[in-house]
Image (cartoon, rainbow, N blue to C red):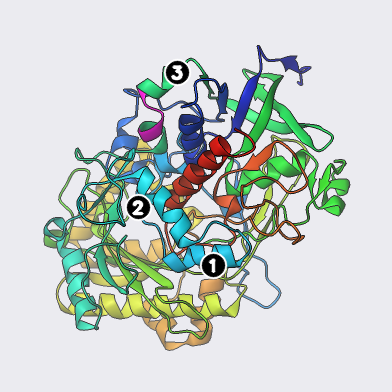
Amino acid sequence: MTHPAEAAPGSFDVIILGGGSAGCVLAARLSEDAARQVLLVEAGQDLAPGAVPAVIASPYPGRAYFNKDWTWPDLSVAMGIGGGEHDRAAPRPYEQARILGGGSSINGIGANRGAPADYDEWAAEGAKGWNWDNVLPFFRKLEHDLDYQDGNTLHGHLGPIPVKRVPRTLHAGFVRHVEAELEAQGYAARDDQNGAWEDGVYPIATNLDEGNRRVSAAVGYLTATVRARPNLTIWTDSHVERILMDGVRAVGARLSRAGRSLEVRSRLVVVSCGALHSPAVLMRSGIGAPDHLSRLGIGTVVGRPGVGRNLQEHPSIGVSAYIPGENRLPRGDHYHIQAILRWSSGLAGAPRGDMHLAVNARSGWHAVGHRIGTLFGWVNKSVSRGFVTLASADPRVEPHVDFRLLSDPADLMRLAASFRLSASILQGVALRGGCQDAFPSTYSARVKKWLRPDPVNGIAMGIVGPAMDASAGLRRLVLKAANDGTPSVEALIADEALLHAYLKLNVGGVWHPCGTCRMGDPDDPAVVCDSRGAVVGTEGLIVCDASVMPTIPCANLNIPVLMIAEKIADQIRHGPHA
């Protein structure tokens, strides 16, 4: 049943639609000006100081990122391009956070920036003022580096987000075996993932504090002191229906809150709903490709055909293996990705460090996952492009998302190289006694079902895990069942065509969607936002999240998104919207 819209009490200077990583930064920074009334709107639950669930605060994120209470329940996407010439990838679940703090509250806790060349590329793509020298001060502003605190101009010391590395002294036996094998294959051991951009093996950088707790944007930015500001209002469990437009000027938003629709007014609207939902909000509000909007009965307010285009992700694939007991992580909650390999594919036109390999000492929260190690590789500078379109004008219906991963042959070739590298590493580790029974692995819908943190999975895997230790034959049957008919590692390595078909069908992402409201030259019809994040052709409307990225950086996206929000908040405070 629908209800007529109600007027919200009062009005605001700024409404921030979306309380993810970017939204939390914006709310904290913009409300520093006591004269500015700020409203932050989030669809999910609050994450208030002192009330953070233990599984979110934990240094092991595996119980958080597949918890259905903290993600959009009906979101599914097409990832790859299918195994045959005319095949299309079947939709599969895709976890996007629906909780205050967004992905920073449930993601893998990686804290890296990407290459300086990533941001120089943004400037070359038309996003003026976003080159490396311009963005480094905002990377430094957001962080409190716990390892590099003196005499290093690359690192920040006063920001709200702690950054520290997992020391090699704490690496599990499996990880140490992988590191030794990588050294034998010629990869140098290096110390600072956020230091000089070089190939090598690094202890991973994380946003964990001194007490080894996750610090999300909600925790780091929306502290009790910030929340006490009388000019900051936070509404959770509130859904964005559309932006209110008066001609081409944004004047507020229509929300669904407590089962009723209401309208709130403001001088400035900032959309921070993420790379999949921000373009959907714009399109529902009449900003997008006119032909697409007209098919859904939406009148065009501002024609911008680039809205929802340019969708990017990091194509990924895993190779896993059984870890003997002495090489596992200790029991209890420990960060599971302990080292990463940055490497260069050497493909013509690809930048240095275009590939990434995460060394996971644990592949699930339960007893079986504790026994599985994974080399999870991805193309760190991918070039394939997908799109987001509306499936319906109804805000309750999720958009249609097609990543088209591996649609560019350069990505397919590089992901195949990643698979072969992972297989060769695990072969060497097996010879060292660090693992057994390597197998191809993906985050398929079936695997995600087993990784869901519920009592049934806990009981079942609690029985299966010890049985895998007791019987090699049973272990191989379990792994075969998990693979569900997938060819063996050996078969895939031996047949390039078979490997390519496997990758097209099974490629995953890394929950790093971006690019769908890209910044750039306003005269470029593919551009959605100018270098301030302002939506071209509108007034009083800004986008601030991963969707504004012109190209995908060689990084986990949370730290770059925090940087974007710091920079755009600074522009709002000192620019024409101040």
Instruction: Please state the horizontal and vertical placement of residue 14, each as a whole percent of the image.
Output: 61, 28
What label sits on residue 343 in the rendered view?
A: none
Measured Cα–Cα span from mark 3 to mark 1: 38 Å
Residue located beneath label 3 in the image: 229
Q: Earlier in the sequence, mark 3 or mark 1?
A: 1
Tell me the chief SS of the magenta region: helix
Cβ atoms under marks 3 and 1 closer than 8 Å? no
Instruction: Please state the horizontal and vertical placement of residue 343, each as a whole percent of the image.
Output: 36, 75
Q: Amino acid at mark 3?
A: Arg
Q: Is residue 306 left or right of residue 101?
A: right
Residue located beneath label 2 in the image: 110
Q: Amino acid at mark 2?
A: Gly
Viewer-nearest residue: 74 or 382: 382
Mark 3 vs mark 2, foreground winner is 3
Residue that protrudes farthest toward the top in the picture: 9
In the image, which residues are magenta?
220-224
Relative height, residue 39 to residue 542 (above, below):
above
Instruction: Please state the horizontal and vertical placement of residue 174, each as a whole percent of the image.
Output: 19, 65
Q: Is residue 117 left or right of residue 93?
A: left
Mark 1 vs mark 2, foreground winner is 1
Instruction: Please state the horizontal and vertical placement of residue 241, each as a whole percent of the image.
Output: 70, 31
Q: Is residue 337 left or right of residue 147?
A: right
Q: Is residue 327 magenta?
A: no
Residue located beneath label 1 in the image: 121
